[in-house]
Image (cartoon, rainbow, N blue to C red):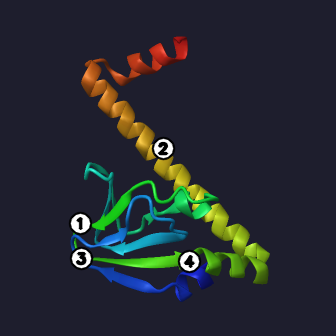
Amino acid sequence: LEILVVNAPSHRYGAGEALVEQGCEDKRIFLVQSGRICSRTSPGEKLDVRQAGTMLGARSFFERGNRGAASTLVAEVDSQVLVIERQAVEAACRVCPAAGARFFRALAMNLGVLVQSQFELLEKEECEESGQPLRELRRQSIMA
């Protein structure tokens, strides 16, 4: 795992600069070192903002075929990002399967944290829209 990060090139993206355009086939994982990266839809709607220590691009990294990136990634401010190419991960897995397993375990854990935070955000928004306490919304969803 460390070898992938140590050998990954670090890129500087200026404020407003795109890392990836929506729809482009891109098989890279981005690890934000500093700054903020915004995920946007093609009409420009802001979906999410990631800061240092977070990862982007996992879905496109794992997808087969030519679906392309789900959103456009844009640096909100000057940002430093490590870029891990799919070929580098595949090569590391061939050389040291245990390192590959650790990489994918870390990736899965990162995705789990992301899914949980998105779920909590959706719950909060639903509470605000309905005016009901979270406990009541959860009870209703369990009863359904």
Q: Nearer the viewer, mark 1 or mark 2?
A: 1
Name the spot of residue 88 as percent of width and height, x first.
63, 81
Q: CA distance from mark 1 to mark 2?
A: 24 Å
Q: Earlier in the sequence, mark 2 or mark 3?
A: 3
Marks 1 and 4 in Cβ contact (< 8 Å): no
For this view, does 37 lie left or right of residue 76?
A: right
Name the spot of residue 18 as percent of width and height, x first.
31, 70
Name the spot of residue 10 as percent of width and height, x first.
42, 84
Task: Give the amino acid type for the residue marked by disc 1 in the picture.
Answer: Glu
Q: Which quarter of the figure has residue 108?
A: bottom right
Which residue position is annotated with label 1? 76
Circle 4 SS class: strand
Which residue position is annotated with label 2? 116
Which residue position is annotated with label 4? 85
Which mark identifies residue 78?
3
Which mark identifies residue 8?
none
